[in-house]
């Protein structure tokens, strides 16, 4: 009997310790998230979770795998995603305080390219996108000439090599990649195709954390505005 109680206590203690450390996955590149865990979102989320007495580790994964791992419970959550991603991944629950407003724009080698603010305008072009970016996949589904690629570096390298005419990506994240890859003569449209608030999602086993975490993110915004990225062209 004593041995049984001891085993139960050890198991309970292990679960408490494990629950104090969470692993989040993301597709984000530096400087937004990096292996040193000191990118913009790394620092933001580490601070937010520390106010819940939780430690986090952030792992970079391809966009599609990052979502699937979080939904399957391999990791504890995932970011940055649009609000309705939970419709496709029902084990993921939104933390309903936006982390960032993302502009989805067209990148091309055509200087001063102008497109209407709608997805239908892409139907005249060969379009590249990163597999796992659901908002893009859903809005260009069925259009001819689309090409899904594994990651964002490949997306911009193939655009530079004229494998497609347009790459759809986040404005700020895209310009960071253009600089990182030292690409020339790649431009983004001034008019976004869409502007969407982006969120953190947690696996449903962490449902109890969401109300407090939401309030903490609101408090942090009130203390100091964050993630006010410049629109660099």
Image (cartoon, rainbow, N blue to C red):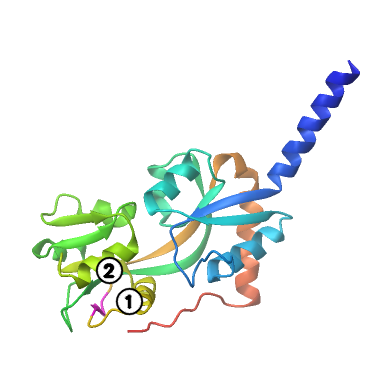
Q: Which residue is mark 1?
A: 178
Q: Are the residues tagged 1 and 2 within 8 Å (C-beta)?
A: yes
Q: Is residue 66 left or right of residue 137?
A: right
- At 47% from the left and 43% from the top, the residue drawn is 69
Q: Nearer the N terminus, badge 1 or badge 2? A: 2
Instruction: Decide: few, some or many residues near mark 1? Use Cα within 10 Å; few <14, some 14-19, many ≥20.
Output: some
Q: Is residue 60 above or below residue 114?
A: above
Q: Nearer the viewer, residue 65 or 190?
A: 65
**Residue 186: image location, x then y, percent:** 24, 79
**Residue 152: image location, x then y, percent:** 33, 63
Question: Quarter of the image holding residue 206?
Answer: top right
Which mark is drawn over residue 219? none
Q: Secondary structure at mark 2?
A: helix
Q: Which residue is mark 2?
A: 156
Residue 95 visible in the snapshot: yes
Q: Which residues are magenta?
A: 186-191
Q: Secondary structure at mark 1?
A: helix
Question: Quarter of the image holding residue 230?
Answer: bottom left
Q: Main secondary structure of the magenta part?
A: loop
Instruction: Decide: few, some or many residues near mark 2? Use Cα within 10 Å; few <14, some 14-19, many ≥20.
Output: many
Residue 201 visible in the snapshot: no
**Residue 172: image location, x then y, percent:** 38, 75
């Amino acid at each position: 009997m004593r041995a049984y109680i001891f085993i139960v206590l050890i198991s309970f203690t292990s679960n408490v310790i494990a629950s104090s450390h969470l692993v989040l996955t993301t597709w984000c590149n530096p400087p937004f998230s990096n292996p040193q865990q000191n990118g913009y979102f790394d620092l933001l989320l580490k601070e937010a979770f520390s106010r819940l007495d939780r430690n986090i580790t952030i792992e970079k994964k391809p966009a599609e795998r990052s979502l699937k791992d979080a939904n399957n419970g391999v990791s504890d959550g995932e970011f940055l995603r649009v609000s309705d991603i939970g419709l496709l991944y029902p084990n993921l629950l939104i933390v309903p305080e936006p982390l960032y407003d993302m502009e989805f724009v067209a990148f091309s080698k055509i200087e001063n390219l102008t497109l209407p603010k709608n997805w239908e305008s892409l139907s005249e072009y060969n379009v590249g996108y990163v597999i796992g970016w659901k908002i893009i996949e859903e809005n260009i589904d069925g259009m001819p000439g689309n090409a899904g690629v594994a990651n964002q570096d490949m997306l911009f390298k193939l655009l530079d090599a004229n494998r497609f005419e347009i790459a759809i990506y986040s404005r700020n994240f895209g310009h960071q990649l253009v600089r990182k890859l030292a690409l020339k003569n790649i431009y983004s449209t001034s008019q976004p195709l869409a502007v969407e608030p982006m969120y953190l999602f947690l696996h449903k086993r962490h449902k109890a954390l969401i109300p407090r975490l939401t309030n903490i993110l609101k408090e942090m915004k009130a203390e100091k505005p964050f993630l006010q990225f410049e629109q660099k062209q």
